[in-house]
Amino acid sequence: MEKVKVMIVDDSRVSRAMLSNNLAKTNFEVVSMAKDAAEAVKLYEEYNPDLVTMDMNLPDADGIECSRRICAIDPAAKIVMISAMKDANLIEQGKAAGISAFLQKPVSTNDLIDTLMLLCQEKISRIAMLRESYAKPFAASLKQGILNLIHLQVETTVELYEKKYLEVNGIAIIIGLTGTPNGRAIVYMTDDTMMTFAEKMLGTKIDDEEEAHEAAEEASNIFIGHGVSSINGIFKDKEMRITPPGTFYGSGVKMTTQKLVTFKITAATEFGDICINVGFSEGD
């Protein structure tokens, strides 16, 4: 997915660093930072960012005047005012100058990202946002979890899953996702893959299938739990949580994916695929 370019305008080095750090693990790329209005106009022309975050207090002009100058260059500029003050008069003046949205300091990471997302909806669809910000952390946690548990380096893929049902042949561990967005994750694999994985995880031959089920459950908790922790590290205001797992096994087990935006994450191993089907509520 193409990165969305952001320019930060703020006279405070600390504020610039905080905003940049908040966007570091997202699909927004900070391409330039300006400390005053003159530099902001120059860098806007040079980098042509998709979005601008604008401080109100600048040493050579206020944020409204700076925004006016940028909009004179590009009437389609998308500017978010981030100021310690936020009142009706400021908003009215800002809108007249071409400012698109207003946030008050200290701004939360989640409010910042949500606002930027709304301003560039034509560039970032909801599906793309869910893939980048939510599905990919689960792919990373699956890859790292397999490495930690059985010392095997694998690659993972993420793809949109558009079928109405997920059919499982083997074991499926379902873990609910609460918070925003809510949904569920299903870790699944064939019986043969489960047995080999469990034996590698426990370092011993397994004859008891129930023991293999328990190993798969524990691994699934780790995969999904670490993914949720990674997401919470970025979106600090919308804490996700996981529910206790429910395990199903058999042949041709069908699970609905309707009313969810769903992604299939696959880790291809030498003894079979370990997959996560993660779905997010369409209403969030």
Image (cartoon, rainbow, N blue to C red):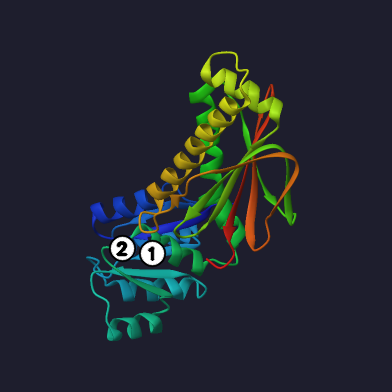
Question: As displayed, is residue 104 above or below residue 239?
Answer: below
Amino acid type of the residue that numbered disc 2 sits on in the rendered structure: Val
Asked whether the viewer can see residue 1, the reply is: no
Q: Secondary structure at mark 2?
A: loop
User: Is label 1 in contact with label 2 (beta carbons under 8 Å)?
Assistant: yes
User: What residue appears at the point 42 percent right and 69 percent down from the top-left corner?
Assistant: 79
Q: Position of residue 15 (x, y in %)?
A: 27, 56
Q: Residues within 10 Å of mark 2 (few under 14, many from 20)?
A: some
Q: 151 or 164: nearer the eye?
A: 164
Q: 250 or 146: nearer the eye?
A: 250
Q: Which residue is mark 2?
A: 107
Q: 26 or 30: nearer the eye?
A: 26
User: What residue appears at the point 29 percent right and 60 percent down from the top-left corner?
Assistant: 10
Q: Would you identify the image quadrant in which residue 192 lies? A: top right
Q: Position of residue 67 (x, y in %)?
A: 38, 73
Image check: 74 left or right of 265?
left
Asked whether the viewer can see residue 45, the reply is: yes
Question: As displayed, is residue 102 above or below residue 280?
Answer: below
Q: Residues within 10 Å of mark 1 (few under 14, many from 20)?
A: some
Marks 1 and 2, how far apart at CA: 7 Å
Q: Residue furthest top?
A: 204
User: What residue appears at the point 49 percent right and 38 percent down from the top-left corner?
Assistant: 221
Q: 119 or 34: nearer the eye?
A: 119
Q: Position of residue 147 (x, y in %)?
A: 52, 25
Q: Secondary structure at mark 1?
A: helix
User: What residue appears at the point 27 percent right and 81 percent down from the top-left corner?
Assistant: 87
Q: Which residue is mark 1?
A: 111
Question: As displayed, is residue 96 above or below residue 85?
Answer: below
Amino acid type of the residue that numbered disc 1 sits on in the rendered structure: Asp
Image check: 10 left or right of 216?
left
Q: Which mark is residue 21?
A: none
